[in-house]
Structure formats: C-alpha cells, structure tokens
Image (cartoon, rainbow, N blue to C red):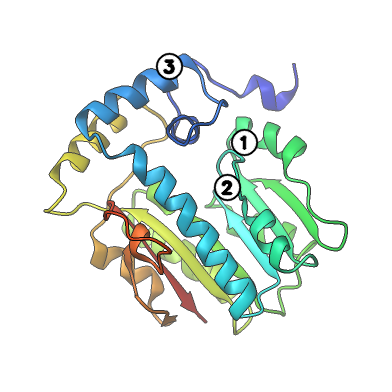
Amino acid sequence: MTDIESRIDTSRPHTARIWNYWTGGKDNYPVDREAGDQIRELHPGIGEYAKADRLFLGRAVRYLAEQQGIRQFLDIGTGLPSADNTHEVAQRVAPDARVVYVDNDPLVLAHARALLVGTPEGRTDYLDADLRDVDTILAAAAKTLDLSQPVALMLLGVVIFVEDDEESYAIVRRLLDALAPGSHLVLSHTVTHPDMPDVDAAVAFWNEHGTPKLTQRTPAAVARYFGGLELLEPGVVSCSAWRPETQTPDVAMYAGVGRK
C-alpha cells in the first residue's frame, strides 16, 4: 500500500467523493453514497449544486482563456477528476496553457496521477498541499507557472473548509498578492440564504456526520473575497446564473470572477 492509499479513509463520508457521486462518478464508496442520499432527502436539489459548480468552472475557464488570454491556472481544491477538468477546458482553447492542481485529499491525488495529463504543448502538474499552506503552494506552483505573468486562481468550493472568516480572507489575499496584475480570482462558496432554509439543515447534517466540516457564508460575505478586484459582470451570483448558456434554477452555491 502506498502512502497516499494508506491515507484514504473509507469509514466516513468525504466531501469530494459525495460530489463525485452526485455528478454521476464512480470514485466513491457506500458510506459516501449513503450520506449523499441522506443529504438529498433533507434538500432534494443539493445534488444539482455539484453539477452547477462544475459547469461554472467550465464557463469561467473558457472565458478567461478565450477572452482574457489567460494561459496559466492555479486550481486549489481540485476535487476528484471529472469531465472537463480545468486543464482540459483551458487547453482546448489554448494548447500551451499551464495548469497546477492543488489538493490534500489522498483519493484525489491518487487519481490525479493517472488522469490529469495535459497536452504536449502545455503543462499540467499537481501538488499535495492544504489551502492554508500558502508559501508551499506558491513555491511549488512557480516551478510550472510564471508568477510574473497573469494567473487564474481557482478556488471552487474550497474556502468553505476554513472556518474562521478572517483567516479565510487572509489566505485568499496572500495568494492574490503573489500574482501579477491581470490575474483573476475564480471562487465559489456554499451560502446560507433565507430563501433556501433546507440548505442549512443539509449542511448541519454534513457537519455532524462527514469530513471535512464546512462553513456557510452569506452572499455578502462571499463577495468580500473579491475586495480590491474588478468584479466581472454579473457579479457574485448563484453559480448557475454566472453567464449561463441555458437558464437553470439558482443554487445555494454562489460564485464570481474578479480581475486584479
């Protein structure tokens, strides 16, 4: 058994594997499917969040590569590989795009080795690190990315795992401070919203039974991550409402894109 394999805990449900289950993937265990079904009973639409977040990722990366000329992506909190991962979307537009994935989930890392293979013209790499390890992430990313040139910082559904508000804002700011002007922040976050009370019940169930625990924030608190940036239209909205190709219902996963 490898070191990574020994770190995989199949006795408790895990966020990345539940999202994989909700999006139709096969990289999950019975404990994840059971928890996923229980959460869906509390909030029947929650499985759509994972799909909406994934589609937002694709639209944002495609926009940045096509319209903003971004050729470098730092994707922290990668999650389990799925269809249209960041490097696939970016390199479809620009084969020379470079992508660094960062995650500390051993199952994600095990699959990253096999699946996250980029184009010959570009580069794709991955790093075993926690979001809080800012210095480690930046030092390792600089081996693949040129941090003196614009980078898209991808933080989809990951700052929810930093409970303390000020710590989470400080982490995002430290990462952005290290990036060149013209860089972009792409961020999504589970929210608490008076129009969606069943989301709070689902999150409470998750925090009692699953790992790692997550923190909801209000839409206004999510918008604060973009402080000092040029927030692109339509602002911080349900990720299903960020420049959608088809109209779909809002979900309690809010997202935005901002330019440094």
Q: Residue 236's quadrant in the figure?
A: bottom left
Q: Are marks 3 and 2 in contact (CB under 8 Å)?
A: no
Residue at which label 2 appears: 78
- The answer to whether residue 193 is above or below residue 205 is below
Identify the residue shown where x is 37% and y is 59%. Answer: 239
Q: Are marks 2 and 1 in contact (CB under 8 Å)?
A: yes
The spot of residue 258 in percent (x, y) is 46, 76
Disc assigned to residue 108: 1
Q: Residue 71's quadrant in the figure?
A: bottom right
For the residues labelled 1 and 3, the Cα–Cα distance comes to: 17 Å
Question: Could you tell which of marks 3 and 2 lies nearer the N-terminus?
Answer: 3
Q: Residues within 10 Å of mark 2 (few under 14, many from 20)?
A: many
Residue type at numbered disc 1:
Val
The spot of residue 219 in percent (x, y) is 25, 63
What is the secondary structure assignment of the residue under circle 3?
helix
Residue 162 appears in the figure: no
For the residues labelled 3 and 2, the Cα–Cα distance comes to: 21 Å
Give whichever of 119, 103 is nearer the camera: 119
The spot of residue 141 in percent (x, y) is 72, 60
Residue 44 appears in the figure: yes
- The answer to whether residue 35 is above or below residue 181 is above
Identify the residue shown where x is 20% and y is 30%. Answer: 42
Residue type at numbered disc 2:
Thr
What is the secondary structure assignment of the residue under circle 1?
helix
Q: Residue 235's quadrant in the figure?
A: bottom left
The spot of residue 97 in percent (x, y) is 75, 66
Residue at which label 3 appears: 31
Question: Could you tell which of marks 1 and 3 lies nearer the N-terminus?
Answer: 3
Q: Give the quarter of the figure containing the N terminus.
A: top right
Identify the residue shown where x is 35% and y is 76%. Answer: 234
Q: Residues within 10 Å of mark 1 (few under 14, many from 20)?
A: many
